Image: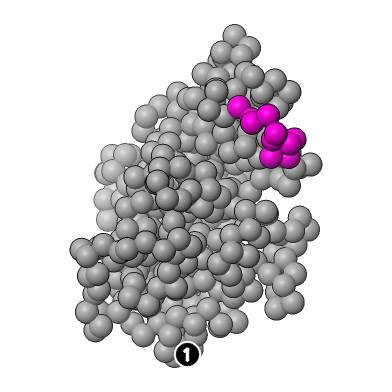
């Protein structure tokens, strides 16, 4: 196993030679660390390939310049590697988590997730984070000796709780799962390998999570401008963006619009990355962690924005929500997309023989198991495939009428 020199990793970094292992024991590679193998298995997975045709905000037919889940994941990985290197963390684990964080997303983005959750409400619901975990532990079927990708404990942990602890010290779900309880996929995997759901994840997982925020917000500005959902002038009073845009205009008053957009977005990303490095370094100095467990047992994240940038980032999210995600052009397409997902679920659940043969339930499969298997099928669809299946069943194309 090739391990980075001791001096290149911080004391609190995850070390591949100190992994808690895999659920199924297997010999490791001589020329790749365990985290490099995790990353490679994610990249070669079916679920990762499908991200190419899964919506970020715009459905694929609206143009090939907009971001998809795949391009978003690559952009997150690029930001995450840069942060990880500067903080002397394990870049391969960070990259694996960045590339795998969206594997569980449905077709048509959050609209698809919302309606699939409604359809699955009586069967335990649907959550894209839990689905990512289910994909890498159950749904992917490529290897002879196990289902899933058999990723390391650290990668499973990071995919599960990159946004923070899921339960309190008494084991009670809180945060987003406070009302609904933990999804079954998370409970089942944690019972098998104890993901320590009451603690924070590694610094690498925290880096992947904040990189998602940086990439998502900055690049949605690019896509929103490209789609004409708002104009440059609308960004003038938005924190971070307005300041950066003003600076770019002063430096390059005659710059063409496309270059101005790119220059603004790239400088936004740089500013947020620099802020994360400064704030995270301050937190790490204060905590003085000597191990990954010190990171996990902290009462707060060690990776984060400064308070001023955190507040500005919240204002930016609010702007994007009001001017992009809630724009009538987007909402109209998403209303139709929801109908597609609902039609597919209801039809396939009531008429399982309409499913492709490989996805049809076994004779002894009960209603709950059939619903979860059907959920795996629909959640794994690309936008394009969902549209094709809907047209096959109903002989109509709901996005274009």
The N terminus: image quadrant:
bottom left
Residue beneath the point at 20% across and 63% down:
31
Q: Label 1 belongs to which residue?
A: 286
Q: Is residue 361 magenta?
A: yes
User: How many C-alpha atoms fall within 10 Å of the one at disc 1: few (<14), some, or many (≥20)?
Assistant: few
Q: Name which residue lies at 73% across and 36% down.
A: 366
Q: Quadrant of the C terminus?
A: top right
Whether residue 307 is visible, yes or no, is no
Which residue is drawn at the image coordinates 51% and 65% (left, top)? 157
**Is the residue 364 above or below the residue 351 in the image?**
below
Image x and y of residue 332, in percent: 63, 27
Horizontal relation, residue 258 to residue 170: left or right:
left
Q: Position of residue 232 (x, y in %)?
A: 44, 43
Element carrying mark 1: helix
Residue 362 vs residue 91, the one in the foreground = 362
The magenta segment is 360-369
Q: How is the image coloured?
A: one colour
Q: Main secondary structure of the magenta part?
A: loop
Point out residue 241 in the picture as x, y percentages from the top left corner: 45, 55
Quadrant in the rendering for residue 370: top right
How far across and down, in percent of the image, does residue 85 sit?
Answer: 29, 70
The foreground one among 361 and 273 is 361
In this rendering, is residue 189 above or below 341?
A: below
**239, above or below 85, in the image:** above
Is residue 76 within the magenta segment?
no
Left or right of 338, for residue 11: left
């Amino acid at each position: 196993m090739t391990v980075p020199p001791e001096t290149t990793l911080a004391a609190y970094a995850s070390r591949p030679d100190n992994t808690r292992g895999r659920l199924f024991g297997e010999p490791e590679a001589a020329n790749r660390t365990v985290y490099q193998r995790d990353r490679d298995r994610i990249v070669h997975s079916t679920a990762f390939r499908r991200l190419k045709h899964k919506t970020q905000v715009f459905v694929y037919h609206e143009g090939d310049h907009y971001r998809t889940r795949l391009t978003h994941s690559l952009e997150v990985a690029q930001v995450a590697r840069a942060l990880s290197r500067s903080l002397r963390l394990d870049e391969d684990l960070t990259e694996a988590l960045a590339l795998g964080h969206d594997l569980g997303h449905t077709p048509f983005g959050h609209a698809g997730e919302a309606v699939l959750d409604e359809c699955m409400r009586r069967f335990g619901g649907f959550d894209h984070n839990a689905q990512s975990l289910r994909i890498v532990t159950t749904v992917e079927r490529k290897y002879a000796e196990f289902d899933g990708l058999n990723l390391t404990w650290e990668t499973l942990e990071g995919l599960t709780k990159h946004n923070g602890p899921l339960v309190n010290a008494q084991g009670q779900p809180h945060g987003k799962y406070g009302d609904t309880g933990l999804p079954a996929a998370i409970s089942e995997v944690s019972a098998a390998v104890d993901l320590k759901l009451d603690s924070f994840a590694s610094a690498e997982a925290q880096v992947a999570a904040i990189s998602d925020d940086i990439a998502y917000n900055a690049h949605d500005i690019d896509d929103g401008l490209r789609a004409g959902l708002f104009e440059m002038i609308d960004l003038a009073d938005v924190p971070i963006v307005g300041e950066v845009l003003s600076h770019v205009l002063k430096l390059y008053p005659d710059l063409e619009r496309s270059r101005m957009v790119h220059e603004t977005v790239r400088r936004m990303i740089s500013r947020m990355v620099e802020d994360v490095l400064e704030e995270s370094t301050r937190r790490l100095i204060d905590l003085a962690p000597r191990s990954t467990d010190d990171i996990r047992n902290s009462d707060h994240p060690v990776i984060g924005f400064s308070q001023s940038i955190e507040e500005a980032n919240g204002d930016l999210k609010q702007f994007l929500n009001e001017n992009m995600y809630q724009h009538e052009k987007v909402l109209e397409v998403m209303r139709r997309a929801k109908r597609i997902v609902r039609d597919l679920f209801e039809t396939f659940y009531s008429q399982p023989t309409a499913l492709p043969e490989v996805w049809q339930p076994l004779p002894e499969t009960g209603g709950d198991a059939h619903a979860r298997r059907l959920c795996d099928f629909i959640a794994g669809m690309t936008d394009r495939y969902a549209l094709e299946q809907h047209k096959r069943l109903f002989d109509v194309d709901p996005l274009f009428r």
